[in-house]
């Protein structure tokens, strides 16, 4: 069943159409919840893949560049006051 907007359903259905409207609303909600669950699962799987790829990238970067150069002496301004 395709997803349907709430605007597709009458706010005050006729009494004779109430049962059919209820079934249609319920079917639309079940479909929407199923879709939401599938999207959440997909998002979680993407998160796991992204985390794994980030870890692999960091590990390979450490193998290529094992020591990160720190700041060189004299490259940062002194924090001591020159007035004495």
Image (spheres, rainbow, N blue to C red):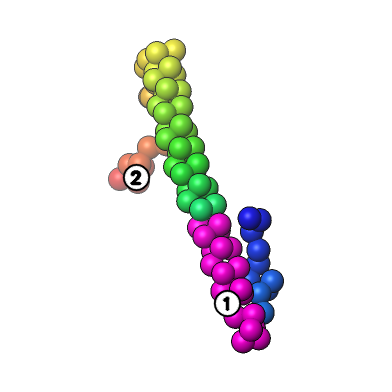
Tell me: 40 left or right of 62. Answer: right
Is residue 70 something that shows in the picture?
yes
Is residue 54 something that shows in the picture?
no
Q: Which quadrant holds the N terminus?
A: bottom right
Indicate whether 35 appears above or below 58: below
Indicate whether 43 appears above or below 72: below
The front one of 43 and 67 is: 43
Image disc number at residue 76: none
**Local secondary structure at mark 1:** helix
**What segment is highlighted magenta in the picture?**
13-33
How many numbered circles are shown? 2
The front one of 41 and 79 is: 41
Image spot of residue 4 (x, y percent) = 65, 63
Is residue 28 covered in magenta? yes
Identify the residue shown where x is 48% and y is 51%.
37
Is residue 69 covered in magenta? no
Q: Judge the density around disc 1: few (<14), some (14-19), many (≥20) Cα neighbours within 10 Å.
A: few
Q: Which quadrant holds the C terminus?
A: top left
Indicate whether 83 appears above or below 11: above
Indicate whether 1 appears above or below 17: above
Image disc number at residue 19: 1
Image spot of residue 72 (x, y percent) = 40, 23
Identify the residue shown where x is 57% and y is 77%.
19
Image spot of residue 66 (x, y percent) = 37, 15
Corner quadrant of residue 20: bottom right
**Local secondary structure at mark 2:** loop
Report, in whole angstroms, how far the alpha carbon at label 2 lies from the one at label 1: 83 Å
Mostly what secondary structure, the magenta segment?
A: helix
Corner quadrant of residue 12: bottom right
The front one of 20 and 27 is: 20
The residue where tag 2 is placed is 81
């Amino acid at each position: 069943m395709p997803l349907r907007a709430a605007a597709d359903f009458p706010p005050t259905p006729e009494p004779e159409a109430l049962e059919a409207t209820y079934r249609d609303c319920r079917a639309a909600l079940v479909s929407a919840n199923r879709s939401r669950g599938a999207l959440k699962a997909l998002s979680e799987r993407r998160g796991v893949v992204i985390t794994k790829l980030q870890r692999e990238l960091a590990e390979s970067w450490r193998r290529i560049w094992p020591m990160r150069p720190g700041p060189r002496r004299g490259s940062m301004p002194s924090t001591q006051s020159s007035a004495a």
